[in-house]
Image: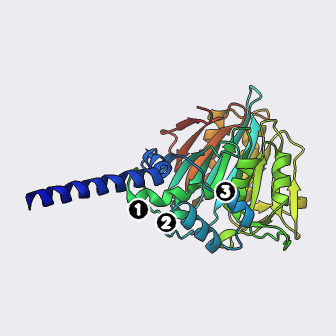
């Protein structure tokens, strides 16, 4: 009997070890990604390096006609069957691109909304450009009382992050961010694959090296706006070229500027229509413009940080500014901070 029990114990141990080895092999990249999660601000700001293939090449072949389609793809491809509910919303944002006194291209961005934990995600796809992007973790189901925390089951939904960027910069020095607008009317071509707001940003970060390439890529796809929140995109590259992509009058409209800088807020700028949401979108735009003009047409990183902290949305005494980021498109470096907390500036370098 002892021999039988001993033999059974050895078999059980071998089976258990084999199961552990197989599990580690199957989830190796996922485990590495979760292990890389680091909280960098108590407000709910994180960093993560995503390892492995997140399947975007396959996604581009089929696209998505609804958020449910994206949820199904992410659940199957990235989350190993664990369901995710993408609660995608828009917000009041301010974005600008300007040069600093050294001639480097600076790109500043605020995201204003209700409480939204954020995650800065580094991705290095095999068939695309490396990038660092900022993700609204609320989309993946996280909240103030439910945050990822490294290598554990509760962090698993953060693996959907590559499909949820709100802004970012890639290794070619191209940056993009979304901003909500009151209305949009994109064209629809039944022969084109459809992308939503955030996967359009992923497309640009993974595949475009210049503003012109980004616009041409976006023209190849239908776009729909998740959660019924219409958006436009400010895109800039390391050459200093920038463009505001708006979907208006049943098509993609490229809004340029005669200035050496470009600013976007929550209003439609196409043909100077200036259709706003009725809050403080024009005041925020003017505040950034005044800061740049009063400084001779330039802003350095420190000044950009100050401007972003000052123009964050306050609504009925409630601070709506969730995160701010300043990308240097020339050096592929930057700084981010949460909820106007300029005492905790988190530096990052894409090519490090």
- Report whether 330 appears left or right of 187: left
- Judged from the image, the secondary structure of the residue bearing numbered disc 1 is loop
Q: Residues within 10 Å of mark 3 (few under 14, many from 20)?
A: many
- Sooner in the amino-acid sequence: mark 3 or mark 2: 3
- Badge 2 vs badge 1, beta-carbon distance below 8 Å: yes
Q: Residues within 10 Å of mark 1 (few under 14, many from 20)?
A: few
Res 101 quadrant in image: top right
- Sooner in the amino-acid sequence: mark 3 or mark 1: 3
Quadrant of the frame with the C terminus? top right
Q: CA distance from mark 3 to mark 1?
A: 27 Å
- Judged from the image, the secondary structure of the residue bearing numbered disc 2 is loop
Q: CA distance from mark 2 to mark 1?
A: 8 Å
Res 261 quadrant in image: top right
Above-or-below relation of 195 to 211: below
Residue closest to the far left: 1
State the scheme by which the image is colored. Answer: rainbow
Residue 274 seen: yes
- Residue 146, numbered circle: 1
Residue closest to the far top: 102
Above-or-below relation of 68 to 308: below
Q: Which residue is mark 3?
A: 56
Q: Position of residue 27 (x, y in %)?
A: 46, 53
- Report whether 68 appears left or right of 200: left
- Residue 141, numbered circle: 2
Q: Position of residue 268 (x, y in %)?
A: 80, 62
Q: Residue at x 8, y 62 (%)?
A: 1
Q: Choose between 332 and 179: the one closer to the eye.
A: 332
- Report whether 33 appears left or right of 288: left
- Sooner in the amino-acid sequence: mark 2 or mark 1: 2
Q: Residue at x 73, y 60 (%)?
A: 60
């Amino acid at each position: 009997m002892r021999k039988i029990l001993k033999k059974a114990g050895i078999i059980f141990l071998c089976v258990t070890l084999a199961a552990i080895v197989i599990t580690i092999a199957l989830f190796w990249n996922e485990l590495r990604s979760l292990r890389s999660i680091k909280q960098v601000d108590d407000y709910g700001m994180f960093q993560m390096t995503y390892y492995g293939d997140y399947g975007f090449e396959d996604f581009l072949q089929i696209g998505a006609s609804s958020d449910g389609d994206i949820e199904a793809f992410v659940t199957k491809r990235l989350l190993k069957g664990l369901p995710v509910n993408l609660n995608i919303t828009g917000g009041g944002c301010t974005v600008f691109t300007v040069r600093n006194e050294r001639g480097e291209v600076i790109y500043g961005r605020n995201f204003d909304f209700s409480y939204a934990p954020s995650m800065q995600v580094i991705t290095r796809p095999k068939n695309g450009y490396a990038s660092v992007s900022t993700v609204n973790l609320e989309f993946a189901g996280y909240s103030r009382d439910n945050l990822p925390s490294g290598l554990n089951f509760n962090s698993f939904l953060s693996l959907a992050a590559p499909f949820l960027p709100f802004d970012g910069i890639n290794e070619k020095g191209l940056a993009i961010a979304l901003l909500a607008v009151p209305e949009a009317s994109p064209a629809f071509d039944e022969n084109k694959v459809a992308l939503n707001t955030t996967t359009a940003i992923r497309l640009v970060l993974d595949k475009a090296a210049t503003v012109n390439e980004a616009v041409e890529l976006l023209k190849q796809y239908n776009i729909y706006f998740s959660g019924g929140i219409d958006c436009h995109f400010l895109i800039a590259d390391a050459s200093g070229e920038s463009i505001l992509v708006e979907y208006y009058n049943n098509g993609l409209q490229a809004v340029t500027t005669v200035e050496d800088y470009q600013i976007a807020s929550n209003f439609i700028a196409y043909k100077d229509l200036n259709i706003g949401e009725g809050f403080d979108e024009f005041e925020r735009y003017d505040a950034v413009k005044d800061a740049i003009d009063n400084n001779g047409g330039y802003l350095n990183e420190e000044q950009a940080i100050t401007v972003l902290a000052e123009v964050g949305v306050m609504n009925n005494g409630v601070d709506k500014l969730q995160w701010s980021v300043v990308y240097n498109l020339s050096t592929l470096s930057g700084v981010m901070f949460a909820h106007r907390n300029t005492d905790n500036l988190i530096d990052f370098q894409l090519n490090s």
